[in-house]
Image (tube, rainbow, N blue to C red):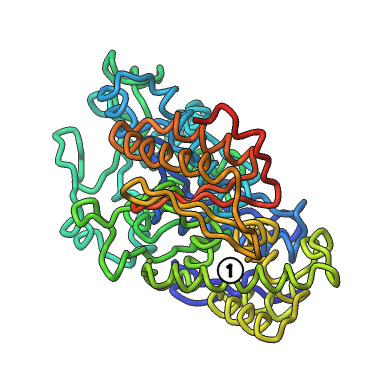
Amino acid sequence: MAKIKLRNSMSRKVEDFVPIDPHNIRLYLCGPTVYDRAHLGNARPAIVFDVLYRLLCHEYGEDHVTYVRNFTDVDDKINAKARETGRSIAEITEETIGWYHEDMDALGILRPTHEPRATEYIDQMIAMIEGLIEKGHAYAAEGHVLFSVASYPAYGRLSGRSVDDMIAGARVEVAPYKRDAMDFVLWKPSDADTPGWDSPWGYGRPGWHIECSAMSHELLGAHFDIHGGGNDLMFPHHENEIAQSCCAHEGAGFANIWLHNEMLQVEGKKMSKSLGNFFTVRDLLDQGVPGEVIRYVMLMTHYSKPMDWTEAKVREVKVVMRKIATLLANDELNHPLNALIKTPPPQEVVDVLSNDLNTSEALTLISRYLRQLSVVNLAGALNFLGFNLGSILEKYHPSETAVSQGRYGVGIESIAHGDTGSSHQRELSQIAEKLFKLRKVAIQTKDFSTLDALKSALTDAGVEVRMTKEGVELIRTARFDPAKLEGLL
């Protein structure tokens, strides 16, 4: 068994991972607030923890690892979107969770063991808040319940900042019902138009931080192995989680290791809507950047370092994918795909990932296997890192035929491997033009249902869809069935 080492944000050191119970490894990742599409930065912690989950399952066995990633489905951002759109909160959150699953599936991310929704654990939150009040760590005031930061002397240990520094550097809500500026909300009142639940303090809803404390306790216990997320959550969210959880379950310890990934940039700049460099995962998928490419680019940088998303990296990885597909296709007779997808990872790949999830070094090994034409090692490494060999072959096999629809509606067909033409070229070009127009409408209206339905029908017909700002590319795969194109225009 490989010795796993992880960078613990609490100690600021790379430490040996020593499980509390090797037959019951438990990890928790703070998941998304479900009011809109997951942006590219949201994908990074999901990918990091996916690699960690795969490593732990490999070393300890799938039946001995419990992975929890929550959905925050009660939040003021969700309430605001409901008011703006006139749609129900349940409809918005259900739709957004569906989008999240689709996008994470496209990135090769395994579903966690549990995906709790905050609204399913309100009773547990109320019970935890009641316990904190009884122990003198929280107080009720004007329909609110607040955690008393002064009651927990270790507050600030995770972020390494003093309370005075945190007050100076944070946007602290000033409210007359607070005993101290740093006290944070555990429960707050709701009006008639805002979702709420009955509680000992009146009709209201939970604060953000108490959600994860209650859900992690219910599903993993008061003391578990690993808790993580993006380092933007370190303060105040994770700092507040630690305070309320340790005070609610004295002596339990909460999480042994805190794992945080650094933030993402785009072309060297912070991702921002104002800079025009803000992307959702779906934006990239629709622009023709396959999930395998997004995942590979993300893994090129160690999780503890800032990651820079660039077009140059995307182009580089697409070349790598084509090389992988070519090697797998040429070797099909020696190593059939159905055998390769079951190939275990080389031990050296397990070893580098065990060294604080060194994914960049694992990709260096993949490059070496590719140069050496070592198909079995290549397949085992790709499987372990979460890449779908069949999908890579289908998308990047050199015998594909592509039909593109340019910005001005000009249909172009590129013919490969001696194919002299296609009776379906005109039909596919017209469909590409239709897709291009539908995408523009969908972006304006935020309604992607018609576009997604057509893409789904094309996939069923054996046609892969790649979309960019400049145009649409339709790829006829080996499963191409022209009969299924009928009725798509």
Q: Which residue is mark 1?
A: 321
> Which residue: 58% across, 68% down?
321
Tell me where residue 27 appears, x and y as whole percent. Answer: 59, 54
Tell me where residue 193 appears, x and y as whole percent. Answer: 28, 16
User: In the shown orientation, is residue 361 left or right of residue 169?
Assistant: right
> Which residue: 25% across, 66% down?
269
Name the kind of residue labelled 1 in the image: Met
- Asked if 364 appears above or below 456 in the picture, the reply is below
Label 1 CA crowd tier, 10 Å (few <14, some 14–19, many 20+): many
Q: Which residue is most to the top?
A: 192
Q: Quadrant of residue 224?
A: bottom right
* 380 vs 14, nearest the viewer: 380
- Asked if 350 appears above or below 282 in the picture, the reply is below
* 111 vs 330, nearest the viewer: 330
Q: Quadrant of the N terminus?
A: bottom right
> Which residue: 74% across, 64% down?
58
Which SS class for mark 1?
A: helix
User: In the shown orientation, is residue 239 left or right of residue 219?
Assistant: left
Tell me where residue 69 appears, x and y as whole percent. Answer: 54, 46
User: In the shown orientation, is residue 432 left or right of residue 77?
Assistant: right
* 406 vs 312, nearest the viewer: 406
Label total for image: 1
Let me know if residue 264 appears in the view.
yes
User: In the shown orientation, is residue 335 left or right of residue 245?
Assistant: right
Let me know if residue 220 appears in the view.
no
* 375 vs 28, nearest the viewer: 375
Q: Quadrant of residue 448?
A: top left
> Which residue: 47% across, 46% down?
31
